[in-house]
Image (cartoon, coloured by chain):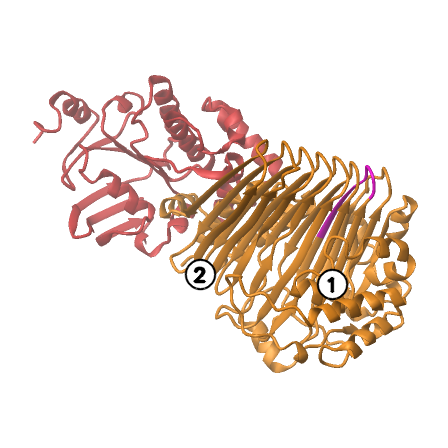
Chain colours: A orange, B red
Amino acid sequence: MDTREKDIENLKDYKYGFSTDIENIRAPKGLNEDVIKFISNIKKEPKWMLDFRLKSFKRLQNLKEPDWQKPKYPKIDYQDLYYYSAPKSMSDKPKSLDELDPKLLETYKKLGIPLQEQARLNGIAIDAVFDSVSVATTFKDELTKQGIIFCSMSEAIQKHSDLVKKYLGTVIPTTDHFFATLNSAVFTDGSFVYIPEGVRCPMELSTYFRINASQTGQFERTLIIADKGSYVSYLEGCTAPMRDENQLHAANVELIALDDAEIKYSTVQNWYPGDENGKGGIYNFVTKRGLCKGRNSKISWTQVETGSAITWKYPSCILKGDNSIGEFYSIAITNNHQKADTGTKMIHLGKNTKSKIISKGISAGFSDMTYRGLVDINPKAKNSSNYTQCDSLLMGNKCGAHTVPYIKNKNFNSNIAHEATTSKISEEQLHYCQQRGLNPEEAVGLIVNGFCKEVLQQLPMEFAVEAQKLVGISLEGSVG
Amino acid sequence: MLKINNLNANIEDKSILKDFSLNINPGEVHAIMGPNGSGKSTLSNILSGKKGYEISGEVLFENKNLFELETEERAHKGIFLAFQYPLEIPGVNTNIFLKTSLNAIRKAKGEKELDAIEFLKLVKEKAKELKFDEEKLNRQLNVGFSGGEKKKNEILQMSMLSPKLSILDETDSGLDIDALKVVSDGVNTLRNKDNSFLIITHYQRLLDYIKPDFVHVLMNGKIIKSGGPELALELEKKGYENFN
């Protein structure tokens, strides 16, 4: 770590702001066919995968970066980024955790992510992604016994080629928008999950994303398939070192639920948000989409978004199967100079489909928050319904909150309900809590957690407590 | 315990308390009675640390300058205010609020924080004493509570925190006889040679249940007369207007 980084680190208490000094293998800087071939080659990918990437790259040439979002950012020079960076020790992939570079183990230990034996105590299977590669997956053997596949995307491309080939790009096609297509061309690693027919996954599956190298974009790709009648709960967490440059994170996540299957996908996003003057931080431009392909299937997104300089994402559900259900529970917190433009899209295609959107936005400091959501009920989606509740909480008078709902109802038998509120934490509420012995920050934490309760309840229990703490920490310094 | 010397308080150039002085010793119960707008709530607001007033004069709590302490530090040192209008905090379970509050104060005092089991035992005990509906402990703080339930909740919190100085700001307003009994039981149970009370009220009625050591009549920001419990009866008979 150089001294400048150390200085930045001392500046503010972002617990995850350290970086690991580790030797990397990088692709040459820039975005071109050779770099894509380099990535594909180093990952020993089959030809169809390289073709998928090159097709996406070709398509990308005709796409323009979107600019309709509320948070604006300086132009990104895509030729000035590294698209692949991996710890050198990973070039011959270690066979077990014991062979893993101790520096990596130490990093995850510092992050509170136990990869070794202690992972057993938590009963959560973890896939750890460090910059561009997956470094370890725990509990593999036990999951394999039930036919569950939980591994890195790279491994899945080699070992479960049929499944990947069948489903990759079916929810987010290579012809999608700019960032999604960029991901399709250069994605490096991520998690792959397959739950066989009728199996209820016995533990939480979790991926932990860590950006370490500087000047590096992280483009991970996650694919989750829940076969007929199966169930899985999946959680991702993210952190990055504090650097005074902005780093791009453009992931694609695709979920597919077949007949009677259910996928619960939770995110606790705590990428480095930049310093209190808005310098540095991650650009979190992510495409997440779930397809309720089968009848009676269900996909539920829960997100707690506290980090990143800019968060720009709309985890969405395409409700194709009859009677399918889509849910979106969101807490988004912006403080200092952070910006967020987030929400969801619920596309109703099948009959009797239902969707529910609960969004809680909290803005403090000089930050700006937009909820943007689409509910689109197609002519054939008879007897469908949506309920949307959007609540905003403002702290101080220098921040902003905006709600932009798009509602399209194309048949008479369906109904859509939308409720929205905007409120402030009152001086009286703060005074009341302080009179009961809480300091102002504890008081804000308590009130905000109350405000977010409906969403926090959706998180797996192991993470709900963590998320509650994070909500409090994110707002530190917002009352004065 | 509490010494108020020549306290003046203004809000937006309007003078509310004028050279207000009062001395409360350990174990004493003082009642302050006065008509609307006499400055009663301003007094409780200032003692609890509410911002927005221009203040001069001196307030000492256990010989410490109260104005140098933040609101929560005053709470840590044992000052409790039963609010005239208890606040609603949506989404926050009453039990969680009580536990957070109790542990914040215990921690500040260097005492061990209670775990969930110890806390539940204590809160159930106290709720039973005060005939507080246990089911309400699992509801959002004061949300959908009736006026009486909110006031009882304040008294429950008081008895959980066992403060040295409890200020009751019109806690009796709008209470039926049963609830009034609960409030006074709460005070009487906590009353001992160390704990003091400042009871702010419009009516003599509460003082039938809580026998004060001193009664003060507050008008236009000043104490115009002090005496024993008999003063309250006199006041009730004459009314504030004819009292002068």
Expressed as whole percent of the image width and height from the top left, the position of residue A196 reads 87, 43
Expressed as whole percent of the image width and height from the top left, the position of residue B165 reads 35, 39
Expressed as whole percent of the image width and height from the top left, the position of residue B105 reads 47, 45
Work out whether residue B124 can be spotted. Answer: yes
Mark 2 vs mark 1, CA separation in Å: 31 Å
**Up-down: is A256 above or below B133?**
below
Name the secondary structure under disc 2: loop
> Residue at horizontal 19%, vertical 45%?
B21
Expressed as whole percent of the image width and height from the top left, the position of residue A208 reads 73, 59
Q: Nearer the viewer, residue A354 or A203?
A: A354
**Up-down: is A32 above or below A371?**
below
The stretch drawn in magenta includes residue A232: yes
**Up-down: is A469 above or below B176?**
below
The stretch drawn in magenta includes residue A248: no
Q: Nearer the viewer, residue B207 or A134?
A: A134
Residue topped by disc 1: A220
Q: Amino acid at mark 1?
A: Glu
Query: Which corner quadrant holds the C terminus of chain B?
Result: top left
- Label 2 marks which chain's residue? A
Label pair 2/1, CB-CB below 8 angstroms = no
Residue topped by disc 2: A365
Mark 2 surroundings within 10 Å by alpha-carbon count, few (fewer than 14), some (14 through 19), many (20 or more) = many
Direction from residue A43 to residue A176 in the image, left or right: left
User: Reading the chain from its start, which is encountered first: label 2 or label 1?
Assistant: 1
Q: Amino acid at mark 2?
A: Gly
Work out whether residue B77 can be spotted. Answer: no
Q: Magenta region: which residues?
A: A227-235
> Residue at horizontal 43%, vertical 43%?
A436
Mark 1 surroundings within 10 Å by alpha-carbon count, few (fewer than 14), some (14 through 19), many (20 or more) = many
Q: Please, which residue is most extreme toward the top here? A: B177
User: Which of the labelled discs sits on residue A283, or is there none?
Assistant: none
Which image quadrant is residue A12 in? bottom right
